[in-house]
């Protein structure tokens, strides 16, 4: 008996289309298949659906310039490409950059290192970033929203769920932490570790994907000083984070070294204007600088 969850009507459609449901689920990293997955199967990703006049950019015989080899894109990669292309085509996105002093957070993490070890956890900075983002989303409700397909209605969400982008061998996955605003750091840290590990093994359940208020994509463990993350629809913003660096910070009298984390906020300009984005990121940076403010 198959371990893949799919209604009888979906299985019947798969047989008509000659689609192997188990193979499709494996390729896209899912344990359940819906009709939309079958209808998308075999369709060219939006990134490759070009007008005839545009195809000349890609329809090139690359072998005339030297040796090449072909590698087919997995269905997982095709789905991701389709989503990214749609996001870029439909969302007028702007990215606002800032940075935050995380001296207090780093010292607090050191103080908790022994307790974290006793709990069998690694308390990373990402747990603090997620908790601070949950607080900021409560303070700025328009960032915790989604726009209707016709652009006439804004859906303001009463919940705070944070998507965590995870880099895996089979592509990018974004499992979601639910109700982050009501959870403590230890629970957030445990759930992030669990979701990241299961993402690597393609064991994230369908109910653990989707429905995020906003996504965090953290490249701090790899490097970089800034980037422009792509908004993940139907969300209206995404927070990018890169590697923390020691930088001189003026304290009013002298420059002192401080760990500064770069912040990159991409947002849908149809919903959020530049001034609001600046206020949001300034508020968020303030929470990271003085995490006590998350408690008041």
Image (tube, rainbow, N blue to C red):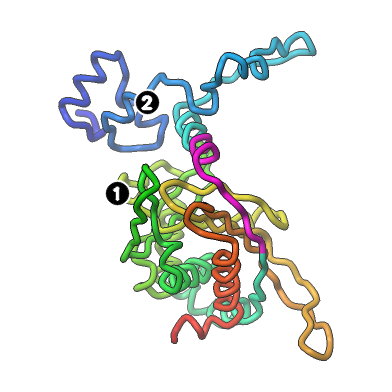
The residues colored magenta run 84-97
Residue at figure coordinates x 36%, y 26% from the top left: 24
- Cα distance, mark 1 to mark 2? 20 Å
Q: Which mark is residue 41?
A: none
Name the outermost residue toward the left.
8
73 shown above or below 273: above
Instruction: Give the mark nearer the N terminus: 1 vs 2.
Output: 2
Residue at figure coordinates x 42%, y 60% from the top left: 162
Observer-nearest of 110 and 279: 279
> Mark 1 packing: few (<14 Cα in 10 Å), some, or many (20+)?
few
Name the outermost residue toward the right.
254
Q: Is residue 263 left or right of residue 29?
A: right
- CB within 8 Å, label 1 to label 2: no
Image quadrant holding the C terminus, namely bottom left
Per the image, the residue denoted by label 1 is 207
* Residue 159: percent from left, percent from top: 32, 64
Residue at figure coordinates x 51%, y 70% from the top left: 123
Q: Nearer the viewer, mark 1 or mark 2?
A: 2
Residue at figure coordinates x 52%, y 55% from the top left: 238
Per the image, the residue denoted by label 2 is 40
SS at mark 1 in the image: helix
Is residue 231 visible from the viewing direction of this image? Answer: yes
* Residue 50: percent from left, percent from top: 55, 21
- Does 95 appear in magenta? yes
142 shown above or below 26: below
> Mark 2 packing: few (<14 Cα in 10 Å), some, or many (20+)?
some
């Amino acid at each position: 008996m198959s371990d893949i969850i799919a209604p009888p009507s979906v299985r019947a459609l798969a047989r008509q289309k000659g689609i192997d449901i188990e193979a499709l689920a494996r390729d896209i990293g899912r344990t359940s298949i819906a009709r939309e997955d079958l209808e998308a199967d075999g369709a060219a990703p939006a990134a490759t659906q070009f007008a005839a006049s545009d195809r000349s950019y890609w329809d090139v015989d690359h072998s005339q310039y030297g040796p090449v080899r072909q590698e087919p894109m997995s269905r997982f990669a095709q789905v991701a490409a389709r989503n990214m292309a749609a996001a870029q085509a439909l969302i007028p996105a702007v990215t606002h950059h800032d940075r935050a002093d995380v001296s207090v957070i780093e010292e607090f993490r050191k103080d908790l290192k022994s307790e974290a070890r006793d709990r069998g956890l690694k308390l990373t900075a990402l747990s603090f970033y997620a908790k601070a983002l949950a607080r900021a989303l409560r303070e700025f409700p328009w960032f915790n929203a989604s726009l209707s397909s016709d652009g006439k209605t804004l859906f303001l969400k009463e919940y705070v769920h944070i998507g965590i982008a995870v880099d895996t061998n089979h592509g990018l996955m974004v499992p979601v932490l639910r109700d982050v605003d009501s959870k403590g750091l230890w629970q957030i840290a445990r759930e992030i570790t669990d979701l990241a590990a299961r993402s690597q093994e393609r064991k994230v359940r369908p109910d653990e994907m989707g429905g995020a208020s906003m996504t965090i994509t953290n490249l701090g463990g790899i490097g970089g000083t800034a980037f422009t993350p792509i908004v993940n629809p139907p969300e209206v913003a995404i927070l990018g984070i890169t590697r923390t660096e020691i930088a001189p910070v003026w304290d009013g009298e002298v420059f002192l070294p401080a760990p500064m984390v770069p912040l990159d906020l991409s947002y849908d300009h149809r919903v959020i204007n530049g001034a609001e984005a600046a206020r949001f990121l300034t508020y968020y940076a303030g929470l990271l600088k003085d995490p006590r403010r998350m408690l008041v």
